[in-house]
Image (tube, rainbow, N blue to C red):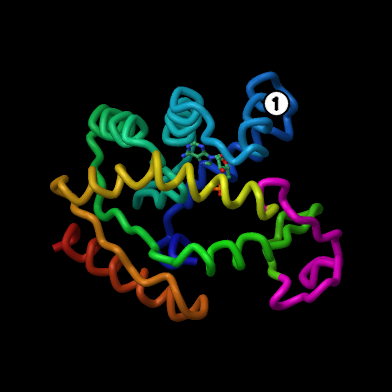
Amino acid sequence: MAAERHGVPRLSTGDMLREVRKVGSEVGLAAQRTMDSGDLVSDDVILGIVAHALDTTVAARGFLFDGFPRTVAQADGLAALLEERGDRLDAVVSLDVPDAELIARISGRRVCEEEGHVTHVRSVGESTECPRCGGRLIQRTDDEPDTVRRRLDVYREQTTPVLEYYARSDTGLTVIDGMGDLDAVAARLEEVLASARSEIVT
Ligand code: AMP
């Protein structure tokens, strides 16, 4: 949503990995096993797919990364990639949501097998039919409760230091409240992005 509003491509490393997985290559299958366990895919693989995306995506007005960087090594790798390209980060945003709400959101998420549309049991109940295209709704393996708990532990161990890393950097870190409905959270995010971009333009 935020990416569309700013006319910039959204680069989600999770989505990119799911695409790599579909191809069934060795790297894809190894990534699948790691993702299904709730652990992080290796920094080398992630930085490789991000470098490829930066080289192949048309993005005159920048990018919006989603779910990346998740480790300090990835943040360092991103800094090197941006420097090579003469680019820089405008803003780093963290959405703050308590664990109980995250578990409810993630374990209730349903994904359409045909088109990848994302919905939630809060909207569709137990229906297995995608409301947008009629495709079959499934739960991602890594959205099952045990894996979600593992993902939260991994986040605390490996991703929390990234927040500290950016808080100390010149770019800085903006933490926004991720509670409330989608429109309210989107409005908070929009405020941060609009102000970061206006500082660049002016
Ligand atoms: P997501 O769709 O962003 O929740 O990511 C799903 C899974 O993909 C994660 O639990 C990780 O296993 C893997 N993944 C996505 N992005 C990254 C990243 N930046 N670094 C390492 N693993 C990642």
| In the displayed structure image, the side of residue 154 where residue 33 appears, left or right | right
**92 to 181, vertically: above or below:** above
Place of residue 34 in the rendered image (x, y in percent of width and height, measured from the top left) = 62, 32
Tag 1 residue? 29
First to last magenta residue range:
121-143
**139 to 81, vertically: above or below:** below
Q: Label 1 amino acid?
A: Leu
Place of residue 64 in the rendered image (x, y in percent of width and height, measured from the top left) = 40, 52
Q: In which quarter of the image is residue 8?
A: bottom left
Q: Dot 1: within a 10 Å radius of its alpha carbon, few (fewer than 14), some, or many (20 or more) residues?
A: some
Report the number of numbered marks: 1
| In the displayed structure image, the side of residue 174 where residue 158 appears, left or right | right
The overriding secondary structure of the stretch rendered in magenta is: loop
- Residue at the image point whose x is 39% and y is 63% from the top: 95
- Residue at the image point whose x is 70% and y is 61% from the top: 117
User: Please, which residue is most extreme toward the top here?
Assistant: 26
| In the displayed structure image, the side of residue 22 where residue 172 appears, left or right | left
**132 to 94, vertically: above or below:** below
Place of residue 93 in the rendered image (x, y in percent of width and height, measured from the top left) = 32, 58
- Residue at the image point whose x is 36% and y is 33% from the top: 74
**87 to 103, vertically: above or below:** above
- Residue at the image point whose x is 36% and y is 48% from the top: 60
The quadrant where ligand 1 appears is top right
Cβ of disc 1 within 8 Å of ligand 1? no
Q: Does the magenta stretch include residue 122?
A: yes
| In the displayed structure image, the side of residue 131 where residue 72 appears, left or right | left
Relative depth, front residue between 9 and 112: 112
Label 1, secondary structure: give it: helix
Q: Does the magenta stretch include residue 5?
A: no
